C-alpha cells in the first residue's frame, strides 16, 4: 500500500538542480544522474516571458497621467510590494510557489511497488502543467538520488490572465485558482490539492497500486534530514507507546485479576444470598409456626382463664362446702362427745343400778341370813324400799338419757340439713 504527499515548499532552484556549490549530506552523488529534469528556467526569464507584454501595455496607459506608477521590472515590483508577506526575512509578495509531490514512503523504496510508484510520479510530473494552465512551471525536477523516497520539486508562478485592474496579467495565487475553477475563498487551495490527489489515485489504479491513507499528515514535505528526525522521533514514540502498552497490559492483567476476584466475591455473595434466602424462608416458616403457636397459646390462655374463672367459682363453692362440712364436723365431734358422755353416763347409771342390785342382794342375803326370824313384813318393806330407790334412780337416769338422745337426734338432723344445703 502507498501514500500520496503534495505539500507547499519554500523552493530553491539551486537545490533542485543540484548546484555543485551546495553541500548535500543526504544525497548519493552516484545516483544524481538518475534525476529527471522536466523544466528548468530562471525566474527572471519566466517573468519576462509572462509579464513583459502586459507590463508594457499597462505602462503605455498610465505613462502620461501617472509616470510615477510606471513599472520598470515586474519581478522587482512583486518582491518589494508592501502588500506582500514576509519570506525568509525579506518583505515582498510571493513571486513564486513550490510544491513537492511524492508517491509512497521510504518503506516502499524496497518494495515490489517501487517501479509502479515512480511511473505514477513521472506521469504526474509530466502532466502537471497541462492540468494547471494558470501555474506557469519554470523549474521541475524529480530527485532520485536522496536517501528518502523519490519525489518531484515543482516551482511555478501563479498567473491570473484576466485582471480588471492594473496589469492585464498578474501574479496572484487566489485569482489563478479562481480562473481554474476552485473559487477565491480560503478553501480554494485545499480543493485544488484534493483534485491533484484524486489524479494520483487514478494513476495508482492504472498501475495496480493500492492506496493507503497516511496515518500522519504534515503541513509541508519533509526533507531527508527532517524525515530521519521524524523516524527517530517515531521510534521514540513507538518505544514510549510500547512501554505504555506493557503498562496497560500489566494493568489489564491486574484488572483481570481484580475482575476474577470480584467474580469470586460476587459468586460467594450469590451463594450467601441464596443461603440467606433459604435461611429467611426457614425463619419465615418458623415465624409462621411461632405465630400459629402464639395464636394457639392465646386460645389456650383464654381457655385457661375461663377454666380458671370456673375453678375460682368452684373453689368458692368448695370453700363454702368445706366451711359447712367443718361446721358439720364440729357438730359431729360435739355430738360424738355428747354421745360418749351419754354413754358414759349410761354406763355409770348401769354401774349404779348394779350397785343398787348388789346392795339389794346383799341386804336381802344378810337379812335372810341374820335374822331368819325377821318378820316378813319388815323384810318386804326393806326390799321394796331398796327396789323403789333403784327404780327411781333408773327412771331418772332413763329420762336424762332420753333427753340426751333427743338432743343428739336434733343435732344429727341439723347436720343432715347443712349437708344437703352444701350440695
Image (cartoon, grey):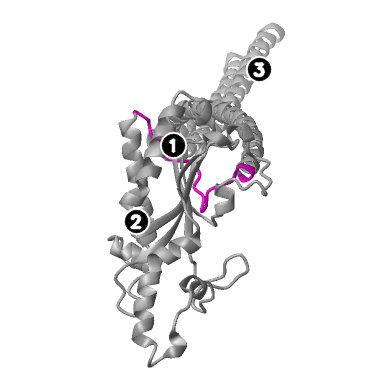
Disc 2 is placed on an element classified as: helix
Query: Marks 2 and 1: which is nearer the front?
Result: 2
Examine the image and state in which quarter residue 230 appears: top right
Q: Position of residue 70 (x, y in %)?
A: 44, 83
Secondary structure mostly seen in magenta is loop
User: What residue sits 53% from the left and 48% below the top?
Assistant: 221
Q: Residues within 10 Å of mark 1 (few under 14, many from 20)?
A: some
In-front residue for pair 57/248 = 57
- Range of the magenta residues? 208-226
Q: Position of residue 132 (x, y in %)?
A: 33, 54
Q: Assess whether mark 3 and mark 2 are in contact (beta carbons under 8 angstroms).
A: no
The quadrant in which the C terminus is found is top left
Q: Answer with left or right where residue 245 lies relative to residue 127.
A: right
Q: Earlier in the sequence, mark 2 or mark 1?
A: 2
Which numbered dot is residue 355? 3
Q: Earlier in the sequence, mark 2 or mark 3?
A: 2
Q: Assess whether mark 3 and mark 1 are in contact (beta carbons under 8 angstroms).
A: no
Q: Residues within 10 Å of mark 3 (few under 14, many from 20)?
A: few
The answer to whether 137 is drawn above or below residue 63 in the figure is above
The quadrant in which the N terminus is found is top left
In-front residue for pair 353/190 = 190
The answer to whether 291 is drawn above or below residue 69 in the figure is above
Disc 3 is placed on an element classified as: helix
Disc 1 is placed on an element classified as: helix
In-front residue for pair 314/409 = 314
Query: Marks 2 and 3: which is nearer the front?
Result: 2
Residue picked out by circle 1 = 301
Amino acid at each position: 500500500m502507498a501514500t500520496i504527499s503534495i505539500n507547499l515548499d519554500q523552493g530553491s532552484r539551486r537545490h533542485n538542480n543540484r548546484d555543485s556549490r551546495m553541500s548535500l549530506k543526504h544525497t548519493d552523488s552516484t545516483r544524481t544522474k538518475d534525476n529527471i529534469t522536466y523544466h528548468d528556467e530562471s525566474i527572471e526569464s519566466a517573468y519576462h516571458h509572462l509579464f513583459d507584454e502586459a507590463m508594457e501595455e499597462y505602462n503605455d496607459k498610465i505613462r502620461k497621467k501617472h509616470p510615477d506608477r510606471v513599472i520598470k521590472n515586474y519581478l522587482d515590483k512583486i518582491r518589494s510590494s508592501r502588500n506582500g508577506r514576509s519570506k525568509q526575512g525579506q518583505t515582498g509578495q510571493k513571486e513564486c510557489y513550490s510544491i513537492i509531490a511524492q508517491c509512497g514512503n521510504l518503506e516502499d523504496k524496497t518494495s515490489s511497488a517501487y517501479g509502479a510508484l515512480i511511473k505514477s510520479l513521472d506521469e504526474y510530473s509530466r502532466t502537471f502543467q497541462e492540468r494547471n494552465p494558470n501555474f506557469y512551471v519554470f523549474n521541475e525536477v524529480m530527485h532520485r538520488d536522496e536517501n528518502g523516497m523519490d519525489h518531484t520539486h515543482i516551482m511555478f508562478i501563479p498567473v491570473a490572465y484576466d485582471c480588471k485592474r492594473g496589469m492585464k496579467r498578474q501574479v496572484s495565487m487566489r485569482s489563478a485558482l479562481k480562473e481554474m475553477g476552485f473559487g477565491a475563498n480560503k478553501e480554494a487551495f485545499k480543493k485544488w490539492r484534493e483534485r491533484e490527489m484524486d489524479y494520483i489515485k487514478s494513476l495508482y489504479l492504472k498501475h495496480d497500486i493500492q492506496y493507503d491513507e497516511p496515518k500522519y499528515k504534515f503541513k509541508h514535505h519533509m526533507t531527508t534530514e527532517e524525515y530521519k528526525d521524524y523516524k527517530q522521533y517515531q521510534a521514540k514514540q513507538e518505544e514510549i507507546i510500547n512501554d505504555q502498552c506493557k503498562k496497560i497490559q500489566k494493568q489489564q492483567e491486574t484488572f483481570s485479576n481484580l475482575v476474577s476476584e470480584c467474580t469470586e466475591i460476587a459468586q460467594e455473595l450469590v451463594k450467601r444470598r441464596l443461603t440467606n434466602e433459604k435461611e429467611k424462608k426457614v425463619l419465615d416458616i418458623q415465624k409462621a409456626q411461632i405465630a400459629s403457636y402464639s395464636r394457639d397459646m392465646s386460645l389456650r390462655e383464654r381457655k385457661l382463664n375461663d377454666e380458671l374463672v370456673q375453678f375460682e367459682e368452684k373453689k368458692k363453692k368448695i370453700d363454702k362446702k368445706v366451711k359447712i362440712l367443718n361446721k358439720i364436723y364440729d357438730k359431729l365431734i360435739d355430738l360424738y362427745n355428747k354421745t360418749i358422755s351419754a354413754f358414759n353416763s349410761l354406763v355409770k347409771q348401769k354401774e349404779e343400778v348394779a350397785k343398787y342390785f348388789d346392795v339389794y342382794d346383799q341386804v336381802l342375803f344378810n337379812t335372810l341370813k341374820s335374822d331368819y326370824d325377821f318378820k316378813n313384813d319388815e323384810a318386804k318393806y326393806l326390799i321394796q324400799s331398796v327396789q323403789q330407790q333403784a327404780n327411781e334412780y333408773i327412771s331418772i337416769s332413763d329420762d336424762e338419757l332420753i333427753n340426751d338422745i333427743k338432743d343428739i337426734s336434733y343435732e344429727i338432723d341439723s347436720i343432715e340439713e347443712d349437708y344437703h344445703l352444701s350440695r
